[in-house]
Amino acid sequence: MVSYSNSKSLRDVLAADYESLARRLTRCLGSPDVAREALHEAFVRADRVSEAVPVRSPVDYLFRMALNLAKDHRKSERRLLNASEIEAIMGLPDERPGPAAEVESRFELEQFERALAELPPRKRDVFISAHLELVPHREIATRFGINVRTVEFDLQHAMEHLSRRLGRKVVRRFGPRALSRSGDRN
Protein backbone atom coordinates (compact mmCIF):
# COMPACT_ATOMS: atom_id res chain seq x y z
CA MET A 1 0.00 0.00 0.00
CA VAL A 2 1.31 3.51 -0.88
CA SER A 3 1.60 5.93 2.04
CA TYR A 4 -0.44 9.09 1.85
CA SER A 5 2.17 11.84 2.21
CA ASN A 6 1.66 15.39 3.50
CA SER A 7 2.73 16.98 0.22
CA LYS A 8 0.35 14.78 -1.82
CA SER A 9 -2.59 15.42 0.51
CA LEU A 10 -1.91 19.19 0.40
CA ARG A 11 -1.77 19.23 -3.41
CA ASP A 12 -4.93 17.15 -3.64
CA VAL A 13 -6.83 19.44 -1.24
CA LEU A 14 -5.59 22.53 -3.06
CA ALA A 15 -6.81 21.16 -6.39
CA ALA A 16 -10.19 20.20 -4.93
CA ASP A 17 -10.80 23.36 -2.82
CA TYR A 18 -8.89 25.97 -4.86
CA GLU A 19 -11.85 28.33 -5.44
CA SER A 20 -13.07 28.30 -1.83
CA LEU A 21 -9.50 28.87 -0.56
CA ALA A 22 -9.05 31.72 -3.05
CA ARG A 23 -12.31 33.40 -1.90
CA ARG A 24 -11.38 33.01 1.76
CA LEU A 25 -7.89 34.45 1.17
CA THR A 26 -9.33 37.30 -0.92
CA ARG A 27 -11.50 38.33 2.04
CA CYS A 28 -8.44 38.36 4.32
CA LEU A 29 -5.97 39.92 1.90
CA GLY A 30 -8.31 42.27 0.04
CA SER A 31 -7.13 41.25 -3.43
CA PRO A 32 -7.99 38.23 -5.58
CA ASP A 33 -4.67 38.55 -7.41
CA VAL A 34 -2.67 38.48 -4.19
CA ALA A 35 -4.75 35.53 -2.97
CA ARG A 36 -4.10 33.53 -6.15
CA GLU A 37 -0.38 34.34 -6.07
CA ALA A 38 -0.23 33.14 -2.47
CA LEU A 39 -2.05 29.91 -3.34
CA HIS A 40 0.31 29.30 -6.25
CA GLU A 41 3.32 29.79 -3.94
CA ALA A 42 1.70 27.47 -1.37
CA PHE A 43 1.31 24.80 -4.07
CA VAL A 44 5.01 25.11 -4.97
CA ARG A 45 6.01 24.88 -1.31
CA ALA A 46 3.71 21.95 -0.55
CA ASP A 47 6.48 19.60 -1.71
CA ARG A 48 8.73 20.91 1.07
CA VAL A 49 6.34 20.06 3.91
CA SER A 50 7.97 17.57 6.25
CA GLU A 51 6.53 14.08 6.59
CA ALA A 52 7.63 13.93 10.25
CA VAL A 53 4.49 15.68 11.55
CA PRO A 54 1.09 14.69 10.17
CA VAL A 55 -1.06 17.53 8.82
CA ARG A 56 -4.43 17.14 10.55
CA SER A 57 -6.36 19.71 8.50
CA PRO A 58 -4.84 20.21 5.04
CA VAL A 59 -7.32 23.00 4.15
CA ASP A 60 -6.44 25.04 7.25
CA TYR A 61 -2.75 24.28 6.78
CA LEU A 62 -2.83 25.54 3.17
CA PHE A 63 -4.85 28.61 4.14
CA ARG A 64 -2.38 29.56 6.90
CA MET A 65 0.61 28.86 4.63
CA ALA A 66 -0.80 31.03 1.81
CA LEU A 67 -1.72 33.80 4.26
CA ASN A 68 1.80 33.81 5.76
CA LEU A 69 3.38 33.82 2.29
CA ALA A 70 1.26 36.82 1.27
CA LYS A 71 2.18 38.69 4.47
CA ASP A 72 5.88 37.95 3.93
CA HIS A 73 5.59 39.20 0.34
CA ARG A 74 3.97 42.46 1.52
CA LYS A 75 6.73 42.98 4.11
CA SER A 76 9.41 42.56 1.46
CA GLU A 77 7.59 45.01 -0.85
CA ARG A 78 7.47 47.63 1.92
CA ARG A 79 11.26 47.58 2.02
CA LEU A 80 11.38 48.50 -1.67
CA LEU A 81 10.94 52.04 -2.88
CA ASN A 82 7.68 52.91 -4.57
CA ALA A 83 7.43 54.89 -7.81
CA SER A 84 7.00 58.30 -6.15
CA GLU A 85 10.02 57.69 -3.87
CA ILE A 86 12.17 56.72 -6.85
CA GLU A 87 10.99 59.81 -8.74
CA ALA A 88 11.85 62.02 -5.74
CA ILE A 89 15.36 60.57 -5.58
CA MET A 90 15.86 60.93 -9.33
CA GLY A 91 14.74 64.57 -9.11
CA LEU A 92 17.47 65.51 -6.64
CA PRO A 93 20.01 67.82 -8.22
CA ASP A 94 23.51 66.46 -8.70
CA GLU A 95 25.68 68.78 -6.64
CA ARG A 96 28.95 67.30 -7.78
CA PRO A 97 31.08 69.62 -9.86
CA GLY A 98 30.84 69.12 -13.58
CA PRO A 99 33.82 68.41 -15.84
CA ALA A 100 34.45 72.12 -16.49
CA ALA A 101 34.53 72.90 -12.77
CA GLU A 102 36.91 69.99 -12.16
CA VAL A 103 39.29 71.20 -14.88
CA GLU A 104 39.13 74.74 -13.48
CA SER A 105 39.84 73.46 -9.96
CA ARG A 106 42.85 71.48 -11.18
CA PHE A 107 44.14 74.53 -13.03
CA GLU A 108 43.75 76.71 -9.91
CA LEU A 109 45.53 74.09 -7.81
CA GLU A 110 48.41 73.97 -10.28
CA GLN A 111 48.64 77.79 -10.21
CA PHE A 112 48.63 77.71 -6.40
CA GLU A 113 51.38 75.06 -6.31
CA ARG A 114 53.54 77.08 -8.74
CA ALA A 115 53.04 80.28 -6.73
CA LEU A 116 53.83 78.43 -3.50
CA ALA A 117 57.03 77.01 -5.04
CA GLU A 118 58.17 80.58 -5.86
CA LEU A 119 58.34 81.47 -2.15
CA PRO A 120 61.63 81.24 -0.26
CA PRO A 121 61.88 77.82 1.47
CA ARG A 122 61.28 79.01 5.07
CA LYS A 123 58.28 81.19 4.14
CA ARG A 124 56.82 78.31 2.11
CA ASP A 125 57.33 75.87 5.03
CA VAL A 126 55.86 78.35 7.53
CA PHE A 127 52.81 78.84 5.28
CA ILE A 128 52.31 75.08 4.84
CA SER A 129 52.69 74.48 8.58
CA ALA A 130 50.21 77.20 9.52
CA HIS A 131 47.55 76.88 6.81
CA LEU A 132 47.70 73.28 5.63
CA GLU A 133 48.93 71.43 8.73
CA LEU A 134 47.20 73.89 11.15
CA VAL A 135 50.22 74.07 13.46
CA PRO A 136 50.03 76.89 16.07
CA HIS A 137 52.32 79.88 15.43
CA ARG A 138 54.27 79.35 18.66
CA GLU A 139 55.07 75.76 17.64
CA ILE A 140 56.11 76.91 14.14
CA ALA A 141 58.43 79.49 15.71
CA THR A 142 60.05 76.77 17.85
CA ARG A 143 60.31 74.39 14.89
CA PHE A 144 62.16 76.97 12.73
CA GLY A 145 64.10 78.69 15.52
CA ILE A 146 62.43 82.07 14.93
CA ASN A 147 60.10 84.22 17.02
CA VAL A 148 56.31 84.35 16.67
CA ARG A 149 56.45 87.81 15.10
CA THR A 150 58.71 86.47 12.33
CA VAL A 151 56.21 83.63 11.74
CA GLU A 152 53.46 86.23 11.35
CA PHE A 153 55.64 88.31 9.01
CA ASP A 154 56.47 85.23 6.88
CA LEU A 155 52.77 84.33 6.70
CA GLN A 156 51.82 87.86 5.70
CA HIS A 157 54.49 87.90 3.00
CA ALA A 158 53.40 84.48 1.71
CA MET A 159 49.73 85.50 1.61
CA GLU A 160 50.49 88.71 -0.25
CA HIS A 161 52.65 86.83 -2.78
CA LEU A 162 50.00 84.14 -3.33
CA SER A 163 47.20 86.68 -3.66
CA ARG A 164 49.16 88.64 -6.27
CA ARG A 165 50.05 85.52 -8.28
CA LEU A 166 46.50 84.10 -8.11
CA GLY A 167 44.75 87.43 -8.63
CA ARG A 168 42.90 87.18 -5.34
CA LYS A 169 42.28 89.63 -2.53
CA VAL A 170 43.74 88.83 0.90
CA VAL A 171 40.99 88.56 3.48
CA ARG A 172 42.23 89.15 7.02
CA ARG A 173 40.42 87.20 9.66
CA PHE A 174 42.27 88.72 12.60
CA GLY A 175 44.86 91.38 13.38
CA PRO A 176 45.00 94.99 12.17
CA ARG A 177 43.62 95.91 8.78
CA ALA A 178 46.08 96.55 6.01
CA LEU A 179 46.86 100.10 5.00
CA SER A 180 45.16 101.20 1.81
CA ARG A 181 47.15 102.92 -0.91
CA SER A 182 46.37 106.35 0.51
CA GLY A 183 47.84 105.29 3.90
CA ASP A 184 44.44 105.15 5.69
CA ARG A 185 43.17 102.10 7.52
CA ASN A 186 40.15 100.38 5.89
Image: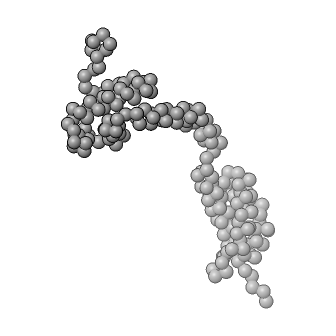
Q: Residue 147: x percent and y percent?
A: 20, 36
In this rendering, would 163 be left or right of 90? left
Q: Position of residue 166 (x, y in %)?
A: 44, 27
Q: Quadrant of the N terminus?
A: bottom right
Query: Extreme top residue here?
Result: 182
Q: Residue 144 falls in which quadrant of the image?
A: top left
Q: Is residue 31 above or below residue 8?
A: above
Q: Residue at x 62, y 42 (%)?
A: 86
Classify 156 as above or below 41: above
Residue 97 visible in image: no
Q: Position of residue 70 (x, y in %)?
A: 65, 58
Q: Going 52% across and 33% down the picture, which residue do you hit?
A: 107
Q: Nearer the viewer, residue 106 or 121?
A: 121
Q: Is residue 117 left or right of residue 107?
A: left
Residue 103: % across, % down: 56, 34
Q: How many marks?
A: 0
Front residue of 22 and 185: 185
Say which of 120 and 45 sits in front.
Answer: 120
